[in-house]
Amino acid sequence: QVHLVESGGGLVQAGGSLRLSCVASGHTFRGVTMAWFRQAPGKEREFVSAINWSGDRTVYTDSVKGRFTISKDNAKNTVYLQMNSLKSEDTAVYYCAVDFPELSGNYYYTSPDAYDYWGQGTQVTVSS
């Protein structure tokens, strides 16, 4: 069984930083895409960032470019999201997700439907 566990969320003031971690277990993860989504109260789930297995290709939604950095450590099966210059609009529950290509079909990577497994989420609250 695949498990994804996020950590690192918390309360931070605007302009501050947090680093989220997502530890994956229960499977081999070679060839997968991993991503971060977020969901604010009353809002739909929003794509934030994604990274390929080798870690040499990353993508970000426009609102976080230049502030957030996604990275991974394959030896630890861990994906990170370094969040700098945080804004109140970044407040949300952040979710880690993994896409096994042969399971989810050909959904676009920014769609939640592309991803097969999800973590429980970690709350990020940015005060202003």
Image: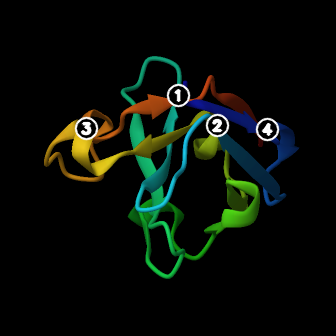
For disc 4, the marked residue is 9
Of the image marks 1 and 4, the number of the one nearer the N terminus: 4
Residue shown at 61%/45% (left/top)?
Answer: 90
Mark identifier at residue 103: 3
- Circle 2/circle 4 CB separation < 8 Å: no
Q: How far apart are marks 1 and 3 (CA)?
A: 28 Å
What amino acid type should be assigned to the residue bearing mark 3? Leu
What amino acid type should be assigned to the residue bearing mark 1? Ala
What amino acid type should be assigned to the residue bearing mark 2? Thr
For disc 1, the marked residue is 40
Q: Comparing marks 1 and 3, which lies closer to the viewer?
A: 3
Does any portion of residue 126 appear in the rendered image? yes
Classify residue 73 as left or right of residue 3: right
Q: Comparing marks 1 and 4, which lies closer to the viewer?
A: 4
Residue farthest left in this picture: 106
Residue 63, image x, y percentages? 46, 61
For disc 2, the marked residue is 91
Residue shown at 48%/60% (left/top)?
Answer: 30
Q: Comparing marks 3 and 2, which lies closer to the viewer?
A: 3
Task: Work out which quarter of the rendered image holds the N terminus and state it.
Answer: top right
Q: How far apart are marks 2 and 4 (CA)?
A: 10 Å
Q: Distance between the residues labelled 2 and 1?
A: 7 Å
Classify residue 71 as left or right of residue 13: left
